[in-house]
Amino acid sequence: MAVSIPTELGFEKIPKLLRQYAVPAIIAMTASSLYNMCDSIFIGQGVGPYAIAGLAITFPLMNLSTAFGTLVGVGASTLMSVLLGQKNYDAANKVMGNSIVMNIATGVIFTLVTLLFLTPILYFFGGSDNTVTYAREYMIIILGGNIITHLYFGLNSVVRVIGFPKKAMAATILTVVINCILDPLFIFVFGWGIRGAAIATIISQFIALLYITKLISNKNNVVHLQKGIYRLSRKIVSQTFSIGLAPFLLHIGACLIVIVLNKQLITYGGDMAVGAYGIINRLGFISIMIVIGLNQGMQPIAGYNFGAQKHERVTSVLNLTIKWATLVTTVSFLVAEIFPRALTRLFTSDPELIDHTVLGMRIYFCTFPIIGFQMVASNFFQCIGLAKKAIFLSLTRQVIFLLPMLLILPPIFKIGGVWWALPASDVMASVMTAYMLYRQKQAFKESIKDKLIEEIENE
């Protein structure tokens, strides 16, 4: 007999629900960020500073790959949350089947196109003769396993949405443990260099994908692998892409920005400035991933209650998620500002790279206390299906504000201008987000008020 989706999403206390759904996702995301950081540490210590810079050159390409993954994965999981809130289980199953087919298709197309033009792409992304060799070695392996990566992240979201956040967490931790075992083995023992880190990544994701596939094959789950769900539906594809368009554009924007950022860094600071960004990005990624974990915990709660038209509960989970996210990013700000040199030495002992990283880190993290709010609020609009607002907010921080700053400030303030462009855009984007969120909360209050009036009149 099929098990129904947990109905506690509609009545259980919000703090308990958010802990229940967010904590496993936070653990998984923290583990994922540590796994990325360990990759960089092993590459920096085992291969050298130019390898770290080479890894940073791959960030735009990784963002581009992630963009296509989230277009399907986030869109499908959000759509499933709403459908499950409406108790439309057949449609939810079809969404999952369609998402598998779409992930495979986008993964294959992206891999083939990128491999054909990999070297010129890496040079365009800010590579130099010193760094492109490392970046190419790494990306050939990563692109070869791109379909595995897309399916792993997409289906892990499904596992979380259908009510198994702890198992989704276990899958992510599994990749981390395997990767951290294989990384030093492949890099130091086998001498495979930066290729070893990429091979370890794909192997760990493949093993986790097998585990997830077994989980969603269980016929006792309300959503599970079955015949008849893989035929593409124009409506499902359209709705999935519509909802997933916001995070897709966010990653496209991130890709564009990192390209411009790398070019400005290499112009005003050289290869070591690019390497510094690679280190800072990995460190900042830890708190960013924790906030993403909070967002993932919020998603099924907000989606279910929005589908059930319980707007008061939607607002409640939003407010609590913002508070927790702000606490996380504030702690990150304090650690980065107090211990920048010690953190940098985890990755490298090169004096030039250390100096560049310390300067960039102090500036990069200075507005982190408000980053949590901006990320949660942007994701919230996506959770409740307001795609256009989510898209706009995604673009404000990544493109609309940051891109002009990266073009205006560096010619005036040199390398300092490159670093200061990041926090300047964060402040402007947060102000815009606060305004739009206020308007949405007012709309919810009006909706609740109208509902109460209707209930009184019906009595």
Image (cartoon, rainbow, N blue to C red):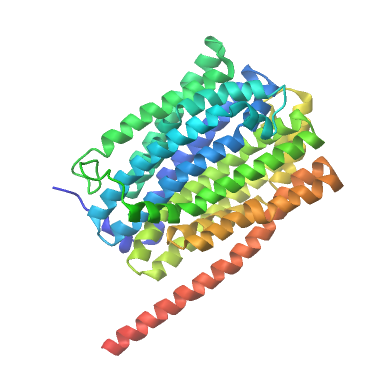
Q: Which residue is located at x 57 percent, y 55 percent?
A: 394
Task: Name which quarter of the figure residue 173 lies in.
Answer: top left
Could you say which is closer to the camera, residue 177 or residue 159?
A: 159
Residue 339 shows in this picture: no
How far across and down, in percent of the image, does residue 367 sit?
68, 52
Nearer the observer, 148 or 10: 148
Estimate the x, y position of residue 21 in percent, counting from the top left: 38, 50
Question: From this viewpoint, which residue is outermost toward the right?
Answer: 412
Q: Image height check: is 194 above or below 10?
A: above
Q: Quadrant of the C terminus?
A: bottom left
Residue drawn at (37%, 30%) of the image = 208
Choose between 285 and 105: the one closer to the eye.
Answer: 105
Q: Position of residue 290 (x, y in %)?
A: 51, 45
The count of marks equals: 0
Rendered residue at 41%/58% (across/down)? 15
Question: Relative to 21, does residue 348 appear above or below in the rendering?
Answer: above
Position of 196 relative to 242 (above/below) = above
Farthest residue toward the left?
1
Looking at the image, which residue sits at the far top? 190
Residue found at x 80% / y 51%: 408
Hey, which quadrant is residue 207 in on the image? top left
